[in-house]
Image (cartoon, helix red, strand yellow):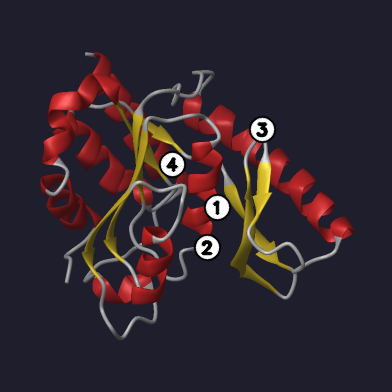
């Protein structure tokens, strides 16, 4: 369906052009690392600053890929209260926050995070399978009092899209495609190579240089 993330970003940016006139009140938040190539294109198209969502999913103890919550440097939320013991959750929060502290240094180089208060926040990723991680992320963003939260993704499973559309923390969902037979995000890209930390950081740096120029 998409050649690569750049192709998906261009198509997605076209669906968000109505926000270009509100660029002074707009922030694009990309979920590392796969969301950065798409987020950079959208931020450039809309004339908005790009930042990263420095939060990570809190995985189920028997399947770390299945999110039962999310952790940010300032807070955490659980989407499944009874899925794990308190000891496991506290240990994971501590481990994840150490990783986030290192990520903040690498990604932002000492820059403060973009203030989301009163802003239209567009959360971007390269696709959504279950929706649990981005739902947890939206709840964390909601706690920073944005004016509006928009989730923009090229592709999502029908179940995940329904979760997003029913969320009280998300005001709008822009999704280009919801294939019926959905196994993994990568199956809808001709090229879906892993984005390295170095590539993601370079994309964020270049986007900020363009925006401040």
Residue reaching furthest bottom?
181
Q: Quadrant of the C terminus?
A: top left
- Mark 1 to mark 3 CA distance (whole Å): 14 Å
Residue appearing at x 49%, y 32% in the figure = 107
Counting other residues with Cα less than 10 Å from the Cα at mark 3, is it few (<14), some (14-19), or many (20 or more)? few
Percent across and percent down for residue 17 are: 12, 39
Q: Which residue is mark 2?
A: 132
Q: Are marks 2 and 1 in contact (CB under 8 Å)?
A: yes
Q: CB of mark 4 within 8 Å of CB of mark 1?
A: no
Circle number at residue 74: 3
40 sits left or right of 142 in the view: left
Q: Find disc 1 in the rendering and name its residue.
A: 136
Residue 186 on image: x %, y %? 34, 71
Image point (41%, 61%), residue name: 166
Q: Earlier in the sequence, mark 2 or mark 3?
A: 3
Q: Secondary structure at mark 2?
A: helix
Q: Position of residue 31 (x, y in %)?
A: 43, 47
* Residue 196 versus residue 211 in the image, above or below: below
Q: Nearer the viewer, residue 48 or 198?
A: 48
- Closer to us: mark 4 or mark 1? 1
Estimate the spatial distance between the alpha carbons at disc 2 and disc 3, rounded to whole Å.
19 Å
Residue, disc 4: 198
Tell me which label, 1 or 3, sits earlier in the chain.
3
| On screen, residue 207 above or below 131 | above
């Amino acid at each position: 369906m998409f050649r690569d993330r750049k192709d998906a970003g261009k198509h997605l940016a076209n669906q968000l052009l109505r926000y270009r006139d509100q660029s002074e009140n707009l922030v694009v938040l990309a979920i590392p690392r796969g969301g950065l190539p798409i987020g950079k294109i959208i931020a450039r198209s809309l004339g908005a600053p790009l930042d990263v969502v420095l939060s990570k999913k809190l995985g189920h103890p028997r399947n770390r890929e299945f999110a039962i919550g999310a952790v940010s440097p300032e807070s955490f939320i659980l989407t499944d209260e009874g899925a794990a013991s308190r000891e496991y959750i506290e240990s994971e929060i501590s481990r994840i926050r150490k990783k986030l502290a290192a990520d903040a240094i690498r990604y932002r180089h000492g820059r403060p995070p973009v203030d989301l208060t009163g802003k239209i926040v567009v959360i971007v990723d390269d696709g959504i399978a279950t929706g649990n991680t981005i739902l947890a992320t939206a709840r964390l963003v909601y706690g920073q009092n944005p004016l509006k939260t928009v989730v923009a993704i090229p592709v999502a499973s029908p179940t995940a899209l329904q979760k997003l559309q029913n969320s009280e923390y998300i005001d709008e969902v822009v999704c280009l495609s919801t294939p019926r037979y959905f196994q993994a995000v990568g199956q809808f890209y001709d090229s879906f190579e892993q984005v390295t930390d170095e590539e993601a950081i370079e994309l964020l740096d270049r986007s900020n240089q363009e925006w401040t120029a």
